Image (cartoon, rainbow, N blue to C red):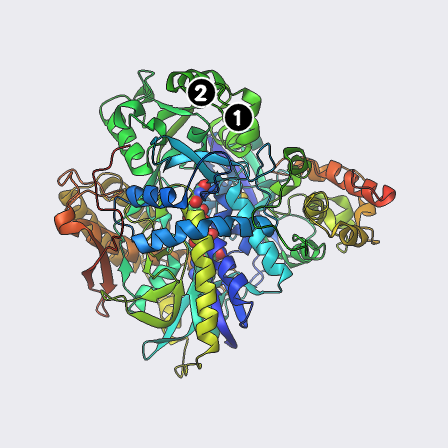
Amino acid sequence: MEATVKIFRFNPETDQKPHFETYTMPVESTDRVLDLLEYIKGNFDGTLSFRRSCAHGICGSDAMRINGRNYLACKALVKDVGLKIKVEPVLGLKVIKDLIVDMDPFFEHFRSVMPYFVNDEPPPAKERLQTIEERERFDDTTKCILCACCTTSCPSFWANQEYLGPAAMVNAHRFIFDSRDRAAAERLRILNDQFGVFRCHTIFNCTIACPREIEITQAIGELKNAISTGALE
Amino acid sequence: MKNHQYDVVVVGAGGAGLMAALYASKTANIAVLSKLYPTRSHTGTAQGGVGAALANDEEDHWEWHAFDTVKGSDYLGDQDAIDFMCEEAIAAVYELEHYGLPFSRTAEGKIAQRPFGGHTNNITKKPVRRACYAADRTGHMILQTLYQQCLKNHVNFFDEFQVVDLLVNNGTVAGVVATEIGTGEMHVFHTKAVIIATGGHGRIWDVTSNAYAYTGDGIAVAMRRGVPMEDMEFFQFHPTGIYKLGILITEGVRGEGGVLINSEGERFMERYAPTVKDLASRDVTSRAMYLEMKEGRSINGKGYLYLDVRPEVVNKYAALDGRKNLDGTPYVVTGEQILAKLPDIVDFARTYLGVDPVTQPMPVQPTAHYTMGGIPTNRFGEVVIDEKNTVMPGLYSAGECACVSVHGANRLGTNSLLDIIVFGKYAGLRAAEYALGSAYQPLPADPADYARAQFDAIRNAKGSENIITVAKEMKVVMMDKVGMFRTGEGMAEALQKVRELRQRYKEIQLTDQGKIFNTDLFNIWELGNMLELAEMITIAAHARTESRGAHARDDYPKRDDANWLKHSLAWVRENGQIDLGYKPVVILKHQPKERVY
Ligand SMILES: Cc1cc2nc3c(=O)[nH]c(=O)nc-3n(C[C@H](O)[C@H](O)[C@H](O)COP(=O)(O)OP(=O)(O)OC[C@H]3O[C@@H](n4cnc5c(N)ncnc54)[C@H](O)[C@@H]3O)c2cc1C
Ligand code: FES
């Protein structure tokens, strides 16, 4: 089998503007798009640049737009994306080089929602107890790997990059609904900002894009609800 | 070139580096440098659990944990350090919980625990529930939680900064040199203490569970500055990697009742480890799999066996073993329970194998997994640089790149996540304490010269070699000859091959001559690190004429305590020659015995 891979290329040190290049190579249906990028880098053009590490969908390094949809390149297999593959950087973040974008604004939003456990009461000698149901309440949002697939697939984020975006909200949700945490009110105040949850227009792109299959739109809905009703249910 | 000054610099932002950072930053002014954004570190991929004798479900004691660790290490682990780690484990896991780590829970609301390979009730010899877990993403939760706490405590991070040299003055640490990947600019960090926490080097082997970033940078940087490396011949192969890809399927699958099956439909581990069966330690299980395949019992004649966690299979063997729930009722699982306890494993199998583990068995093969050897330290994270354990002032190390040694010749599952939190903490504490009580060493006139020379050599190399080819040849020869089964002859061949590759390496043509995100340049530098380590590993392995833990030799099939109950040390001399030395193992309560599981 042969695949044609068309890749967005931009080298800030030599190029005025971006262009596409197309490469053809032998593939197997179980190859990851990441494998194809490695193949191209190794055999055709060593300057091709992208981030990657774990190669199995856990570290969150290699979010990119593949055939118009956000994926982790290591979790998109040839059998899923076909033999004509177009690869571009994610949208809404500045392109630095080829498939590498500036992640700083993304992480700034993440950091702005107090994405850490807060509980100043003196801890018990052993663990704080939590029931299986209480733990289950926020299980889904603990899976986030900060890959940015969701945020960079969101039209509200494309329209205005001040918008916190789904990933930041997922991480706020993870703590707000943790029975052991004590800073829910403060986080909800942050999320109630003009660039917060109410910019979400329930378009569901984020949920579709999430490689961890987190029900993001639902989580954001729960946050909106908590803000409107003042109750964490 | 930019200059910075900090009391302590932590190199690496995985579990070990972040734990060190949390503790060091309580008193000292510190910086954390990481080539990956912190949450991309390999700690995040750890699945099954972190070991601690909490006894939440059943009787357990840290002393049992310590004995299991000693036995698992094939008696090469230092017992003072092992006792320390297993005793500290309990407080360390509670501390993680207090940082908000979302552990799975028992019915009573306590931290949930599952069985894992080699962890036993020392009286009944049966598996014990000791691995504290958060579903099958325990490492992810540890990494996220520690990073979150670092943010809360305003730790200074330099993300995507790759450390390329360690600066030493008069035998004392003076700083590190790093390249900012995004700009290509070099930075000099003047510091009193450096904590190396850069993880392992499993990319040296062809089939591996390890990330692209696992290229042994921290070890390579330190050994080029004269620091010896300990027990480099010991590298762990995990029994269950996804066929061909090497992606890890946690031992937790077997903890939940999954079994290994050969082409005859036989649960063959019964023959190799009659008591704990599929939950024998990793060296034993990987070797059993290798032998099964060698004797023609692989599935469809290909290089794999089945890992079967289908509920009907789990229940059948659980009944045969008489496995019970805590309330004494027979152990029975449903498909939904498998899915709930192992969601990521189910996802990996579906994505990469097209197999649904709830209804089909998974094709698996042993996969290169864990670096037991590394930078020698004592149990406080202080780097010790000779046979007499002399401390090198200002240098600390923790995590997979360090060798305390608590894992000896074979690490038990769940003990690495434990290692990173316990020794990360002590390295952080000790480094801060040292830094606050000492002065900055003067830096050389041109601190970045050695680092620059290495990168200039790569930039200026002219030749027709390709990085992919050289890397692949290294991986294949290391897999075949310095992998799960070794012989003197094979290793001699491997050594020759690796040396040849080190020559060819100098002729690798760099394509990208730019500054910004030059991953081509770093890939070549990292391959250079791996080749140097491969040579050292092979020399240390060739010298050890016995079989112990993960180091299994066909020509010396027995453990030889009379001659080899000792740690190896390997130095790279300035002329490139590698010299070996040895130091004794610390033995306290547990005298070496034959290992039976
Ligand atoms: C798939 C998998 C599953 C596992 N499951 C378990 C388990 O269930 N239980 C268990 O106990 N253990 C498990 N392990 C082992 C355990 O996860 C690791 O040994 C441990 O997490 C290593 O942590 P660390 O902090 O030493 O290194 P890492 O978390 O790998 O961190 C290394 C850090 O160093 C940085 N770095 C590297 N080189 C440089 C450089 N040149 N300059 C700057 N920074 C650098 C990286 O960016 C990274 O931040 C597993 C391992 C794998 C691969
Ligand atoms: S490389 Fe880690 S998520 Fe793809």
Total labels drawn: 2
Q: Chain of mark 2?
A: B
**In the depicted structure, whether residue B101 falls above or below residue A2:** below
Residue under the image location 64 percent in, 38 percent down: A139
Q: For this view, does B580 lie left or right of residue B251?
A: left
Quarter residue A75 falls in: top right
Residue under the image location 84 percent in, 53 percent down: A194
Residue type (three-letter) at the residue carrying disc 1: Ile
Quarter residue B134 falls in: top right
Which residue has dot 2 on it?
B314
Q: Chain of mark 1?
A: B
Which circle marks residue B338 in the picture?
A: 1
Q: Earlier in the sequence, mark 2 or mark 1?
A: 2
Image position, residue A186 (x, y; %): 78, 54
Residue under the image location 40 percent in, 52 percent down: B85
Q: Are marks 2 and 1 in contact (CB under 8 Å)?
A: yes
